[in-house]
Image (cartoon, rainbow, N blue to C red):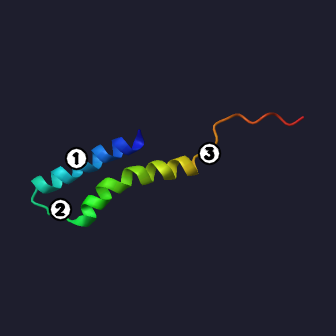
Amino acid sequence: TIWKARFGIEAAALVGGVVLGGTVGWGTVWFLVSIGPLVQIALARLALPTDDPEPVR
């Protein structure tokens, strides 16, 4: 799912930042946990329908 992929990407970025000497705060952890589900919800609500409409006669 999208949220699992986003979580993996953000977790890798977090680990990379820590390895490079960055700090981890509550905002960082909150972003890591929340961005995946929020993106998945937003994409589901904003997606255009993919069904072909019936032709008008």
Q: What mark, if any, has residue 24 been given in the picture? A: 2
Determine whether, in the image, residue 47 is placed left or right of residue 55: left
- In which quadrant will I find the N terminus? top left
Q: Is residue 31 above or below residue 13?
A: below
Determine whether, in the image, residue 32 is placed left or right of residue 36: left
Q: Residue visible at 31% across and 47% down?
A: 7
Occupied quadrant, residue 32: bottom left
Name the amino acid type tagged 1.
Answer: Ala
Determine whether, in the image, residue 10 is placed left or right of residue 47: left
Chain-order first, disc 3 or disc 1: 1
Q: How many other residues sit within 10 Å of disc 2, few (<14), some (14-19) or many (≥20)?
A: few
Mark 1 vs mark 2, CA separation in Å: 13 Å
Which numbered disc, 2 or 3, marks the residue closer to the eye?
2
Chain-order first, disc 1 or disc 2: 1
Where is residue 17? Give x, y as percent: 16, 56
| Circle 3 residue | 48
Where is residue 51? Give x, y as percent: 67, 35
Q: What mark, if any, has residue 45 been given in the picture? A: none
